[in-house]
Image (cartoon, rainbow, N blue to C red):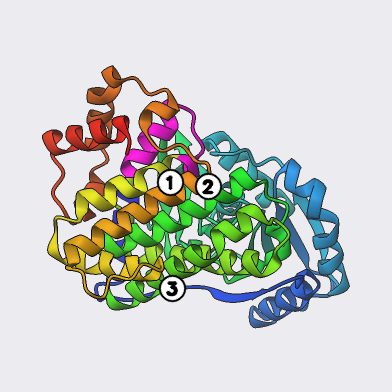
């Protein structure tokens, strides 16, 4: 996915961090109208008589669409709803949301759902002001005119799509990126209540996706001191709250902390990029039809271990072990990194997630073909701190197959 890498480098020549305005809380949906009004005011428009486009999917619409429309109506906005987003959206889905957006011509777009929905809300807001097919948005910096404002409201806590400048679309079986600073949300709206209906398995896998974003951003060659700060904060919050949210779904304090963790990790990887773990996860996820979070969760301990031979990474993993709650004060960086790896392994166990490739019914005979597909993900590998070649990658995949 070369687009991601290009985007990270086109955002700025200098180390920098870009992020949206973020509002957060427990049960704050009613304040959506105020946020929409103030965004419209900054574009020189009145909320009264303006039109919002709500981009969502059938399942989320059934739970929350009415309340969102009500909140927008209280500020004077009328709402059109596009509820046709599918998981891992294809180019056809992107084209249909773009066409709907052009036809309804909204003044503001609101995305409500998981990462796929939020990505399609980005496409919708760009389509209103850019008259070309969504296919031509693919790649880096292909959105030429400023989109209409957008508010992104995640209903899972993991993808970080509300914080990143990417929208992912599946084209001929491969994930491709629309990478543009114009994809950044104007407002990321984090309401813990919206994530409280996630079933435990989705809570676990999406939460571990957030952890993988933070860890990979930390290990990435694109990291800088600010992305590191966001990444460590995310790791600390995941360590303290993911298992609470998993075992007590209605714990809104834990849900809010996880929503913040996903956002923080999104800022970290949106600016520093992700590395080897996501190259493997995308390959496994597409080939074996595994949810993104399940595939990324599985890679976490193995990729940490693989990269820990780089001294700078081992030093960072010592801080990670500490954020995980391990006492590593008297340990060398290498021994502390091993503790961080062991802690990540135990999280997979406690969250009842697959722990090895064999758990996903991946046959050992498939490993060479998987290695070839991962090696083709050059953008991710270029940012990995340790050089990845066919030999060390195959050894890593063998280890992932056997498990710990
Ligand atoms: Fe991810």
Q: Is residue 288 magenta?
A: yes
Residue 224 numbered mark, or none: none
Q: Nearer the viewer, residue 247 or 57?
A: 247
Image x and y of residue 278, in percent:
35, 46
Give how far apart the Cα atoms at labels 3 and 1 are: 19 Å
- Give the magenta range: 278-294
Residue 163 can be seen in this image: no
Q: Confirm or deny contact between disc 1 and disc 2 (CB under 8 A).
A: yes
Residue position for label 1: 297
The secondary structure that dominates the magenta segment is helix
Residue position for label 2: 351
Q: Earlier in the sequence, mark 3 or mark 2?
A: 3
In the image, is the residue at mark 3 within 8 Å of ligand 1 by its beta carbon? no
In the image, is the residue at mark 2 within 8 Å of ligand 1 by its beta carbon? no
Residue position for label 3: 233
Q: Identify the residue at horizontal 55%, vertical 49% (top origin).
A: 204
20 lies above or below 207: below
Image x and y of residue 164, in percent:
46, 62
Characterize the local packing of mark 2: few (<14), some (14-19) or many (20 or more) Cα atoms within 10 angstroms. Answer: some
Q: Helix or strand or loop: what does disc 1 sit on?
A: helix
Q: Identify the residue at horizontal 16%, vertical 44% (top origin).
A: 388
Q: Helix or strand or loop: what does disc 3 sit on?
A: helix
Circle 3 or circle 2, nearest the eye: 2
Q: Identify the residue at horizontal 69%, vertical 46% (top origin).
A: 100
């Amino acid at each position: 996915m070369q687009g991601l890498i290009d985007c990270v480098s086109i955002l700025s020549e200098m180390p920098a961090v870009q992020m949206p305005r973020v509002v957060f809380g427990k049960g704050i949906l009613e304040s959506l109208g105020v946020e929409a009004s103030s965004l419209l005011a900054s574009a020189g428009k009145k909320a009264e008589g303006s039109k919002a486009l709500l981009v969502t999917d059938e399942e989320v619409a059934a739970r929350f669409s009415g309340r969102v429309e009500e909140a927008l109506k209280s500020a004077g906005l009328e709402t059109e709803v596009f509820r046709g987003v599918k998981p891992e959206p294809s180019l056809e889905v992107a084209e249909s949301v773009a066409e709907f957006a052009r036809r309804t011509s909204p003044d503001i777009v609101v995305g409500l759902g998981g990462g796929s929905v939020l990505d399609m809300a980005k496409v919708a807001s760009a389509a209103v002001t850019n008259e070309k097919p969504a296919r031509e948005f693919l790649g880096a910096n292909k959105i030429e005119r400023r989109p209409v404002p957008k508010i992104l409201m995640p209903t899972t806590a993991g993808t970080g799509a509300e914080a990143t400048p990417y929208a992912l679309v599946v084209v001929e079986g491969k994930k491709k990126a629309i990478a543009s600073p114009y994809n950044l949300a104007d407002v990321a709206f984090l309401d813990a209540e919206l994530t409280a209906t996630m079933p435990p398995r989705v809570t676990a896998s999406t939460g571990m996706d957030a952890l993988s974003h933070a860890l990979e951003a930390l290990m990435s060659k694109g990291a800088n001191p600010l992305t590191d700060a966001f990444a460590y904060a995310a790791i600390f919050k995941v360590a303290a709250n993911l298992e609470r949210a998993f075992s007590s779904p209605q714990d809104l304090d834990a849900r809010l902390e996880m929503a913040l963790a996903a956002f923080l990790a999104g800022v970290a990887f949106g600016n520093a990029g992700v590395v080897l773990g996501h190259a493997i996860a995308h390959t496994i996820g597409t080939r074996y039809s595994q949810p993104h979070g399940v595939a990324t969760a599985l890679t976490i301990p193995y990729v940490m271990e693989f990269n820990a031979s780089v001294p700078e990474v081992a030093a960072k993993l010592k801080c990670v072990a500490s954020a995980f709650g391990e006492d590593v004060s008297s340990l060398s960086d290498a021994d502390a990194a091993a503790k961080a790896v062991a802690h990540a392994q135990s999280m997979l166990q406690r969250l009842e997630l697959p722990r090895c490739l064999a758990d996903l019914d991946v046959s050992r005979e498939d490993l060479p073909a998987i290695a070839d597909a991962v090696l083709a993900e050059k953008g991710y590998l270029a940012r990995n701190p340790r050089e990845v070649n066919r030999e060390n990658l195959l050894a890593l995949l063998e280890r992932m197959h056997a498990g710990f």
